[in-house]
Every structure is written in C-alpha cells, then in structure tokens.
Image (spheres, helix red, strand yellow):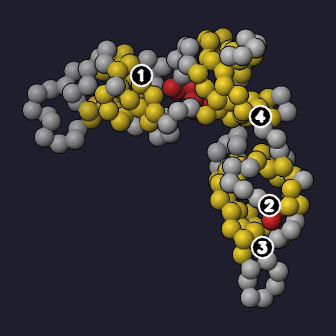
Amino acid sequence: MVSTNNLKNGMTLLIDGKLQQIVDWNHHKPGKGGAVVRTKLKEVETGKVVEKTFRAGEDVEQAIVERSTVQFLYREGEDFILMDGTSFEQRQAPAAAIGEASDYLVEGDELQIQVYDGRIVGVELPASKDLEITQTDPGFAGNTATSATKPAVLETGKEIQVPLFIEQGEKVKVDTRSGAYISRA
C-alpha cells in the first residue's frame, strides 16, 4: 500500500482489479473541504486513459511490475516466442499480450516487456523503427506537386501510407506509436 500523498508519475497501481499507471497527478486543496489528489491513469493492458480523484492521505495498492528486455524469436500460430537475453529462458506470449506492437516486430528484435504476477501485461517498443517495404505501387512522375501518398506493405505485413517516391525494397523509418511514415532509413 502507498499513500496518495506519495504518488509519482510512472508508478503502477492496482485499482478495481486493473493495473493502472500514473500519467499525471496533482495535489489540490480547495478552499472548503479536504485536500484531494487528481490523477490521470493509463490502464496498462488496454492503454485507455482515465481520470480518478482520491482523498489526500488515502491508501491505494501499488502493483510491482517487473520490466525486462527480451528478444522476439518467432511466431508459433497466434503466440509469440520470446527469449530472455540473460538467462536464455524462452516464454510464450499470447497475441493479446503483445497487442499492436506485433505490427512492428521482426524476428531478432529486442523489446521491453512488463510482467505482473507471472503474465505479460505490456510491451514497449522504441518510438521509431526501420522496416523494409515489401510491396507498393510505383510512383508516377508529375504527381509530386502535392504531398500525395500511396499504400505500402511493410515486411511485418502492416500497411502504411508513404510518399510517392518510396519504392519496393527500400527501408523506411516508421513511428511505432501512430504507424506513420517518418523518413527513409
């Protein structure tokens, strides 16, 4: 248990059976009544951000979430096989635990996982990633006056929009948070 007076950004709490990470908090003392702590909490498993207000000094349950670096080895059906880099222990992670990060994973990639109570509850990727374009239509000369885009398929199978001058076989830098093209790699 931790007091709401001691909350910090990034701390993970267990509230109503859900893991929630503190994004922002503010201690507020109104002119009338007791002090309160207003928080913005991000649900670890869904990414949904909610606001919650606590009384100052109230105890909340802190969840100890372990973070570790693992290497993505391969997919086995719907599951992902990950290997711990220090102990070489392999673990199977369901697709639901990996979530949208699967759109950017290539065999051999390293990623940060969050483990709570023996199960993977979150995955952290770098903000951007270099991936190869495996399929796209050729661009046409003269179409470059505007910032026109065309669909392209990445080596992971995810489809993104890229500028017309990008061709098949090129590596591009992709924002892993939004899925947007950033630049050539």
Give x and y (percent) for residue 5. Answer: 80, 65
Q: If you read the primary sequence from the N terminus, does the residue marked by circle 1 or circle 3 appear first?
A: 3
Q: If you read the primary sequence from the N terminus, does the residue marked by circle 4 or circle 3 appear first?
A: 3
Which labelled disc corresponds to residue 6?
Answer: 2
Q: Secondary structure at mark 1?
A: strand
Closer to the eye: label 2 or 1: 2
Q: If you read the primary sequence from the N terminus, does the residue marked by circle 4 or circle 2 appear first?
A: 2
- Which residue type carries mark 1? Leu
Residue 150 located left or right of residue 58: left
Closer to the eye: label 4 or 2: 2
Query: In 3D space, how far apart are the residues under numbered discs 2 and 1 (Cα atoms)?
Result: 42 Å
- Which residue type carries mark 4? Glu
Residue 159 located left or right of residue 29: left
The number of numbered discs placed on residues in the rendered structure image is: 4
Give x and y (percent) for residue 154. Answer: 41, 21
Query: In 3D space, how far apart are the residues under numbered discs 4 and 3 (Cα atoms)?
Result: 29 Å
- Which residue type carries mark 3? Val
Query: In 3D space, how far apart are the residues under numbered discs 1 and 3 (Cα atoms)?
Result: 47 Å
Query: In 3D space, how far apart are the residues under numbered discs 3 and 2 (Cα atoms)?
Result: 13 Å
* Residue 50 in the image: above or below residue 84: below
Query: In 3D space, how far apart are the residues under numbered discs 1 and 4 (Cα atoms)?
Result: 29 Å
Q: If you read the primary sequence from the N terminus, does the residue marked by circle 2 or circle 1 appear first?
A: 2
Closer to the eye: label 4 or 3: 4
Mark 4 highlights which residue?
A: 66
Q: Secondary structure at mark 3?
A: strand
Query: In 3D space, how far apart are the residues under numbered discs 4 and 2 (Cα atoms)?
Result: 20 Å
Mark 3 highlights which residue?
A: 36
Closer to the eye: label 3 or 2: 2
